[in-house]
Amino acid sequence: MIEAEGTPGPGPEGVSADPPLQPDVSPDRFASLSSQEHRLLNLVADGLTDREIGERMSISERAVGKYIEDMLDKLGLQTRTQAILFAINRAFQSPDLPSATGSEAEAQETPGQS
């Protein structure tokens, strides 16, 4: 069998060196996030850079990086990609939660139509 070039092989003891994309995160960990961290998670999931997040939250780019690290620690995650997948999975599991932008649901609801 030929491995694709650039694909990491298993590390010591046959365990992959890369963290899993979707680690087990208990739902109560999400509840431990502050409202600012909820907003931060949504902005990360929207694909914004640290600079763009900083502009939206009126904080420095460096502070955004620190806040993201703290948020990842609270959630037990290691990467931004894991945070994005966590946010997406949470949105699918909780249809009553508003989306990061909130505009999609509002655009679908038109007053006076059944």
Image: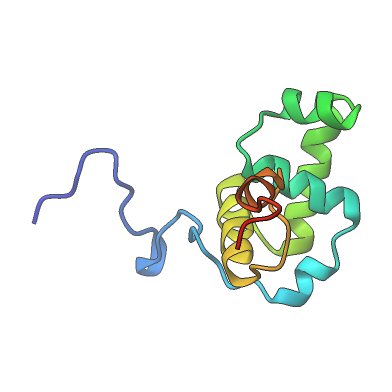
Which colour assignment does the render follow?
A: rainbow
Q: Residue furthest front?
A: 112
Mark count: 0
Quadrant location, the C terminus? bottom right
Residue shown at 62% from the left, 57% from the top: 113
- Residue under the image location 45 percent in, 55 percent down: 17
Rendered position, 14 above or below 60: below
- Indicate whether 12 appears above or below 29: above
Q: Where on the picture, by quarter, is residue 44?
A: top right
41 or 105, which lies in front? 105
Q: What x and y, as percent, mark residue 60?
A: 87, 24
Farthest-out residue, left = 1
Residue 60 visible in the shown view? yes
- Give me the residue at 29% from left, 39% from top: 6
The quadrant of the picture occupied by the N terminus is bottom left
**Residue 67: x percent and y percent?**
83, 43
The x, y position of residue 43, in whole percent, is 71, 40
Q: Nearer the viewer, residue 75 or 39?
A: 39
Specify whether 100 is left or right of 58: left
Frontmost residue, 81 versus 114 = 114
Query: Residue 112, located in which quarter of the rendered image?
Result: bottom right
- The answer to whether residue 70 shows anywhere in this view is no
- At a point 71% along the width and 52% down the height, the residue shown is 111
Q: Which of these two is toward me, 104 or 35?
A: 104
